[in-house]
Amino acid sequence: MRLTLHTDYAFRVLMALARAPEQVQSVEDLAREFSVSKHHLMKVAQNLTAGGFVATVRGRNGGLRLAMPARDINLKSVALHMEPDFNIADCFGNGQCSFLPRCGLKGVLGEARHAFLQTLGRHDLASII
């Protein structure tokens, strides 16, 4: 299982904001810190804002800050919001599989996906900074 870069950057942004919750940080500064495209990080920030994890501050010294305390941000919630799906194989989406319906792999992969999300669900942002 692999998270998209979009979700990876989302976790990085949240961790950076949680390290200094009293500060507002610009997307430009965060992009420079992570050595990633400002344009791409802006999309991540917009998605985090839409999910209610991050708040934007307008103005000359504007930027991003956490929308809630780090202990209230569950990692599973972030991943589920940021990831387009968790279809780790074609058989989870609309893909065709010649082995279905008698394939045992789908059940094993489904169990692995469940365990992955269950582990994320046991942690909040505060526990990883």
Image (spheres, grey):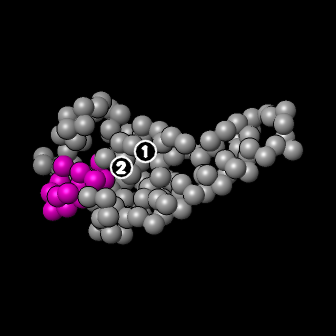
Is residue 110 found left or right of 97 in the rendered image? left
Q: Residues within 10 Å of mark 1 (few under 14, many from 20)?
A: many
Quadrant where the C terminus is found in the figure:
bottom left
Q: Amino acid at mark 1?
A: Thr
Q: Amino acid at mark 2?
A: Phe
Q: Which residue is mark 1?
A: 7
Query: Circle 1 — which element?
Result: helix
Say which mark, if any, is on residue 37. none
Q: Nearer the viewer, residue 98 or 50?
A: 98
Q: Quadrant of residue 32?
A: top left
Residue sitting at 54 percent across and 54 percent down?
116
Please, is residue 22 above or below residue 99 in the view?
below
Q: Which residue is mark 2?
A: 11
Q: CA distance from mark 1 to mark 2?
A: 6 Å
Image coords of residue 68 (percent x, y): 31, 67
Magenta region: which residues? 13-25
Residue sitting at 54 percent across and 57 percent down?
117
Residue sitting at 30 percent across and 64 percent down?
126
Is residue 61 found left or right of 114 in the rendered image? left
Quadrant where the N terminus is found in the figure:
top right
Label 2 near label 1: C-beta < 8 Å? yes
Determine if the magenta segment contains residue 24.
yes
